[in-house]
Image (cartoon, grey):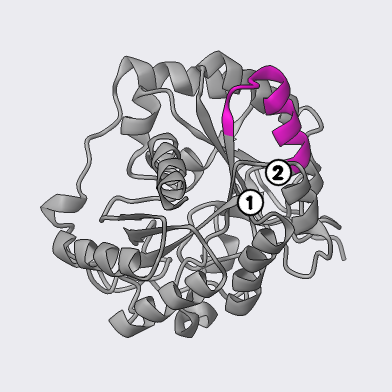
């Protein structure tokens, strides 16, 4: 028997795996420190037009980043390669999930051209998870890095990669392309992986970051977590220790925000003074750079933070 799907009158939901999940309880009201202005500036509109003209995706839009107005006004954007559909179904993420389309062979070139047009001094390139690809998309990352070097040779490059789970040799491909910063987010504490990040494995992600340093000890490494998902403070401190054991240089900590009521609930809004305390502890544990605040995201202020990161390493010598 044939099954016909009407995707015109009844389009496929953005998160089909969550469609039948019960709504979470209504989250607590957002406090004043987490609120941002709606994006309406001229710079925002110009950045948006450039993305559309080059058929590019950004994690700023796909993940509903609260900092999009601020960043796009300055013509800063985090490019999301490998398409707009993820093969994972993390409970915190607003990126579309499902079976992805074939890779766009022109995407690396378009990213390189857009980088030059925006005049970026520092660029962040991330992606969806592509478990359907033999190398998890590592080769596409390498091609994108190469295209940026061609079109904008003075631009420093930060990659925020998936975990390349069960993709032998993938991390080696990306490191060989020589990004300036290799970022991979742990996202949360180990005890919450089953409910928050079920397709991933905590110690695999930790090992990936450690492997980057083994391949290139001079490459900056970076990772981030969210708080407000139900983690305990001592678990956050243990994650810090684990990342330092993997020689990670830069840690980001930000507030989790629930995209929809089908996603993981916000357990609490962490006040700014707690973020400041976590930042102080992280520096004491040996990180070269720490960014911890309610609105901190992996690529927020990435260019300025990279300059500070280089200065911190130079100061140690």
Which circle marks residue 68 in the picture? none
Q: Is residue 246 among what the camera can see? A: yes
Residue 50 in the image: state x and y as whole percent. Answer: 54, 18
Q: Alpha carbon of mark 1 to alpha carbon of mark 2: how far? A: 6 Å
Secondary structure under the numbered disc 2 in the rendered image: loop
Q: Is residue 98 left or right of residue 40?
A: right
Q: Is residue 24 magenta?
A: no
**Disc 1: which residue:** 128
Question: Magenta residues, as a range?
Answer: 142-156
Q: Split into 4 quadrants, where in the image is the N terminus?
A: bottom right
On screen, 206 above or below 10? below
Residue 38, position as x, y percentages in the image: 26, 33
Classify residue 267 by image quadrant.
bottom left
Q: Position of residue 237 (x, y in %)?
A: 36, 78
Q: Residues within 10 Å of mark 2 (few under 14, many from 20)?
A: many
Expressed as whole percent of the image width and height from the top left, the position of residue 251 reads 42, 59
Residues 3 and 126: in front is 126
- Which residue position is annotated with label 2? 82
Reply yes or no: does residue 147 show up in magenta.
Answer: yes
In the picture provided, is 66 more to the left or to the right than 111? left
Q: Residue at x 73, y 68 (%)?
A: 165
């Amino acid at each position: 028997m044939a099954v016909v799907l009407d995707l015109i009158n009844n389009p496929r939901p953005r998160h089909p795996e969550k469609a039948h999940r019960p709504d979470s309880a209504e989250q607590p009201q957002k406090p004043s420190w987490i609120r941002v202005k709606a994006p309406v500036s001229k710079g925002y509109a110009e950045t948006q037009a450039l993305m559309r003209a080059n058929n590019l995706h950004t994690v700023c839009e796909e993940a509903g980043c609260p900092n999009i107005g601020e960043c796009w006004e300055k013509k800063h954007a985090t490019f999301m390669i490998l398409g707009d559909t993820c093969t994972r179904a993390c409970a915190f993420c607003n990126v579309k999930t499902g079976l992805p389309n074939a890779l766009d062979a022109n995407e690396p070139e378009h990213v390189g051209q857009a980088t030059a047009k925006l005049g970026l001094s520092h660029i962040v390139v991330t992606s969806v998870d592509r478990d359907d690809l033999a190398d998890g998309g590592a080769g596409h990352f390498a091609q994108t890095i190469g295209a940026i070097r061609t079109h904008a040779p003075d631009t420093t490059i930060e990659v925020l990669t998936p975990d390349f789970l069960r993709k032998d040799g993938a991390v080696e491909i990306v490191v060989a392309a020589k990004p300036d910063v290799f970022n991979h987010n742990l996202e949360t504490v180990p005890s919450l992986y089953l409910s928050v990040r079920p397709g991933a494995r905590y110690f695999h992600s930790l090992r990936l970051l450690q492997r980057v340093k083994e391949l290139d000890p001079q490459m900056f490494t970076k990772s981030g977590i969210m708080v407000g998902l139900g983690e305990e403070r001592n678990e956050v401190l243990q994650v810090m220790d684990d990342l330092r054991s993997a020689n990670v240089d830069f840690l980001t900590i930000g507030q989790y925000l629930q995209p929809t009521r089908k996603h993981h609930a916000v357990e609490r809004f962490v006040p700014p003074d707690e973020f400041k305390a976590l930042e102080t502890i992280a520096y004491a544990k040996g990180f070269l750079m720490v960014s911890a605040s309610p609105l901190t995201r992996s690529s927020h202020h990435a260019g300025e933070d990279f300059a500070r990161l280089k200065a911190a390493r130079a100061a140690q010598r």
